[in-house]
Amino acid sequence: MATGTHSQIDWLGWLRRWDAQQEGYVPEREARFDTMFEAMAELLPASFVAIDLACGPGSISQRLLTRFPEARAIAVDIDPVMLAIGRGAVGTFDGRLRWVEADLAQPDWPAALGETQVDAVLSATALHWLWPEPLTAVYRDLGRLVRPGGLVLNADHLAFGPAAPNSARLSQRVLDEQWTDAAFAARGIETAEQWWEALSAEPAFASLLAERTARFAGKQRQESPPGFDVHVAALRAAGFREVETIWQILSNRVLLAVR
Ligand SMILES: C[S@@+](CC[C@H](N)C(=O)[O-])C[C@H]1O[C@@H](n2cnc3c(N)ncnc32)[C@H](O)[C@@H]1O
């Protein structure tokens, strides 16, 4: 929050720089967001409540609440740095946006939300952090949280399953080429590592970064996060009756699940 040493931080600048590097990984990021919002415009009433799951600094919430003036959102993330940038840069949208710190890998995360039922849950470039068991548990929780007729929209790279080895190989090769440091440098785009390094060089972030280190202690990134088949099966088991890819470039997809 913009108090004390934090008042020196250019929150909006850090959010813009975040969006720029995320777009480096997913050049179609805005089109992916738009696809999610098109689905919501078609399938939800004008007034709805949505969760921005693993929200980062709130890129989804910011766009969602601009596009849907009668909507409310709850932005959830484990990372105190991300939440501080979101609060500082996006704010509360005149009381329509709440920020919640919670670890989705812990079973008690829904209790932190302050909502027992919502119309939609959106997530982008995030659920690959969750290992298969907590991912399945999160979808099970969403099956209880999302009202009948409500939606889950997950935009992420969801790897092709064992039945599609050729598509998997093609997809992996393209990512291996696009996501190298050299490819980012050639496009003049900062990598996520460089963004974190630059942020760490600002003394005003020191206490938030220390909190972040504590929150992520013991967490490991997965070499091979759960793929498309695992997401579909977990959503169906959680009670979502229609689970479909509604946008796709290779393994980069928007998955729509209707409760
Ligand atoms: C690449 S960012 C994407 C953020 C945002 N959705 C966007 O598209 O800009 C992934 C986010 O997932 C969050 N995350 C990772 N593991 C988490 C967990 N166990 N619980 C909550 N959030 C988590 C990270 O803190 C980070 O903000």
Image (cartoon, rainbow, N blue to C red):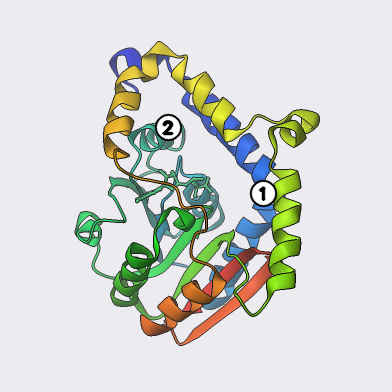
Indicate left or right for 240 with 153 as reference: left
- Image: 222 above or below 142: above
Q: Amino acid at mark 2?
A: Ile
Is residue 88 shown to the viewer in this render? yes
Residue 239 image offset from top left, x and y in percent: 37, 84
**Mark 2: few/some/many CA within 10 Å (<14, 14-19, 20+):** many
Please give left or right for residue 51 compared with residue 123 in the image: left
Q: Does 210 sit above or below residue 217? A: above
| Residue to which mark 1 is pinned | 26
Identity of the residue furthest to the right in this view: 186
Name the secondary structure under disc 2: helix
The residue beneath circle 2 is 85
Residue lying at the far bottom of the rendered structure: 241
Instruction: Name the residue type under label 1.
Output: Val
- The image quarter containing residue 71 is bottom left
Residue 167: percent from the left, percent from the top? 73, 70
